[in-house]
Image (cartoon, rainbow, N blue to C red):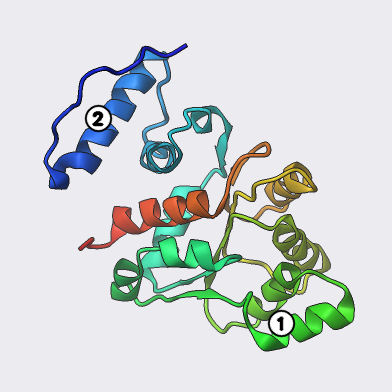
Amino acid sequence: MSERKTEIEYVLPGEIEKRSFEIIGEELLSRGIILPKETEFVTKRVIHASADFEYADTLMFSEHAIETAQRLLLNGADIVTDTNMALSGVHKKTLEKLGGQVHCFMADGEIARIAKESGETRAYVSMRKASEMKKDVIFAIGNAPTALISLYEMIQSGEYKPAFVIGVPVGFVNVEVSKEMIMDTGVEYIVNRGRKGGSTIAAAICNALLYSVGERD
């Protein structure tokens, strides 16, 4: 059981995030965890968003994940999310300065119609729509494993190969297997193994990557 805090730590508003990351670093050290230098800025921001240190063990990165994602962002890639919550969490000003935009097609009327007629989820159909975009896309999936399954099927059939996939859906049904499927495609990825994840985590990963290459307001 963690020690109960009994004293308030007074920190200036502009210093709260900095102090939070200092605490994360201290606690990682106390746990004997040394993160890989190349990926630690992503993992720490995910821990910052979740207060969950398990991500230090379960967050997986493909061999060229960081350099690929950073190059895509610098070249103006767009981000597609599977929830409006994730969309709202992405730092749009930083992305726009790099020439990109963030999209979510879940509320699109045409997507809803197709999903109803086909019996597929809107997340599944949304990925098909995103595959028609005429530029590189970073997919940030924090809620729907069917979004990852849709991407996987397009990759396997040769229809489409995403430039990058952030796969962190949360839940119990098809969540774990969908993540493992993406990791076996040869596509560059950041994936959290297991049941944990969520829209907040997807946005945190996007922002960590954005802040690493863009000017942050």
Report the disc number at residue 215. none
Q: Residues within 10 Å of mark 2 (few under 14, many from 20)?
A: few
- Is 101 placed above or below 139 here? below
Mark closer to the chain start, 1 or 2: 2
Tell me how many marks there are.
Answer: 2
Q: Residues within 10 Å of mark 1 (few under 14, many from 20)?
A: many
Report the disc number at residue 111. 1
Answer left or right for 194 relative to 76.
right
- Please give the residue where the numbered disc 2 appears in the rendered image: 22
Q: Residue at x 36, y 33 (%)?
A: 37
Q: Residue at x 64, y 56 (%)?
A: 143
Q: Classify mark 2: helix, strand or loop.
A: helix
* Quarter of the picture holding the C terminus: bottom left
Check the image and name the residue furthest to the front: 6
Where does residue 205 sit, x and y in percent of width and height? 45, 51
Where does residue 1 sit, x and y in percent of width and height? 47, 11
Real-space CA distance between mark 1 and mark 2, rounded to the nearest whole angstrom: 44 Å
Three-letter code, disc 1: Ile
- Is 143 placed above or below 29 here? below
- Is 133 placed above or below 50 here? below
Where does residue 165 sit, x and y in percent of width and height? 59, 57
Residue in front for this viewpoint, 61 or 210: 210
Q: Classify mark 1: helix, strand or loop.
A: helix
Where does residue 212 sit, x and y in percent of width and height? 31, 53
Three-letter code, disc 2: Glu
